[in-house]
Image: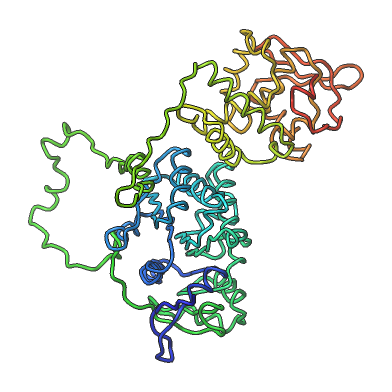
Amino acid sequence: MKVGIDMGTTSEGTSASLDIEELLATRLLVQGNSGSGKSHLLRRLLEQSAPWVQQCIIDPEGDFVTLADKFGHVVVEGERTDAELIGIATRIRQHRVSCVLSLEGLDIEQQMRSAGVFLNAMFDADREYWYPVLVVVDEAQMFAPSVGGDVSEEARKVSLGAMTNLMCRGRKRGLAGVIATQRLAKLAKNVAAEASNFLMGRTFLDIDMQRAADLLGMDRRTAEMFRDLKRGSFVALGPALSRRPLKVTIGSVETSARSTSPKLMPLPEAPQDVEDLIFTPDPEELSRPVVRRPAPQPRPASDILAELSRPRPEAGALVEAKPAQPEISAEEREAMLDGLFAEILANPEAALRPDAELYQDFLVRCRIRRVPGSAPSLSVFRRKMAVARSGVDAETAATETWASALRLADRVTEDLQGVFLMMAQAAVRGLPCPSDTMIARAYGTHSARRARRLLGYFEEQGLIVVHADFSGKRIVAFPDLGAETAPGDANAQDTGMSGRAAAE
């Protein structure tokens, strides 16, 4: 079914039509400096296409939550656990409900992590739920940066991986990416390059104009036109828009954002005693408590999940009660979880997959095995995964020395705990020192040089001492544990086995 929506008027005075079916197959990139009208363009696109296709908006500023009142979008607050976001995203795809993921009030790292987890969950939906979804990401340069910033490497990997999946592999899963950015130069090239439709707004920096011209097939001189575009005017090109560059002025919208552009207003008349007014403190000022704006309270996950999964029985139909799960002891539940960790680690590719992907796999396995109780959080999962990757046996895990090793592991970041504990268990058990390739594999990389840098980092932190025996084999000592590994060949090749199997 071919559906064309009206985006506004062209420079020729005709209606600017956008083919939704073609957009679902070819994706869209919107670029323009702050104040060029990107958010207005996205709102026009969302309003016009709302009756025809399911929508998901990644909203870092909470500007699009107003769509809920008129078009029925479900607002999902981003301040949730990973497990909650995964569950909500899965039901969003199952029940074909349009939603707005509002990330307002979160810092940039939390925004990247929440958006990445949510998008990955939509991407990993079962094949039977691969219905078409228009996925709109505002300020895409935040979620797919071209270079690393001040956020953690893990958050950047999760967010960038999710955006890459959306733009590169999302089409076959029904996900059509629409990304908007202020700076093309700050947006990862492999994400921007997958779009076949473009709407380029006002741009002043040469580097951004050049990238926009390259994407549109223009020469450098023609790219100067981007400086002269008015607010709300864009140059359109692509199979869903126009076969040649065409200037488009975006039409009006029915809803409005909660935040608006600043407007000039006259200043009040200055009082006569203005200096006394400013420099004399209020008598209650010193005793008045400092009140900070609290973070927005998210709707309970139970309310959203109930809204999405509310049954629609036919008249007179009876809804069968869900059978209660049998109760099991805490020890039996822990044994079930340990078995799931062992299944995941049995896959040779698990060592090279990020924890966020493994966590989603783990949650799916929990549902399949019907593990009772709430699933562990991502931080608990990472800790358990680090212990499982270390290869420690049950006898060693019950010792006080191993408990001390776990406390020492808290002094390193979560992504390094698996490597640290693998080295520690070899020292506690007196096993040969792991090779560079084994350490690299535990860290999720193929780089032996990075493995040696990790050992150097641990030594700088005062956690280990690295030395060699007379034959040149490496030994790693743990002064706080009073233990050290047996001599091991640093250049030995990893067989791909788990830490426990390789050690034995």
Point out the residue furthest to the left here: 272
Q: Quadrant of the C terminus?
A: top right
Point out the residue furthest to the bottom here: 12
Q: How is the image coloured?
A: rainbow
Residue 388, picture quadrant = top right
Point out the residue furthest to the front here: 316
Where residue 319 sits in the image (x, y, percent)? 36, 42
Q: Nearer the viewer, residue 49 or 270?
A: 49
Q: In this picture, is 482 found above or below 255?
A: above
Side (left or right) of 128 relative to 315: right
Where residue 168 sits in the image (x, y, percent)? 62, 60
Q: Residue at x 31, y 76 (%)?
A: 252
Side (left or right) of 244 relative to 475: left
Q: Nearer the viewer, residue 199 or 348?
A: 348
Side (left or right) of 30 relative to 284: right
Where residue 101 sits in the image (x, y, percent)? 40, 52
Q: Nearer the viewer, residue 185 or 421?
A: 421
Q: In this picture, is 36 found above or below 404?
A: below
Residue 130, picture quadrant = bottom right
Q: Residue at x 71, y 29 (%)?
A: 456
Where residue 218 sits in the image (x, y, percent)? 60, 81
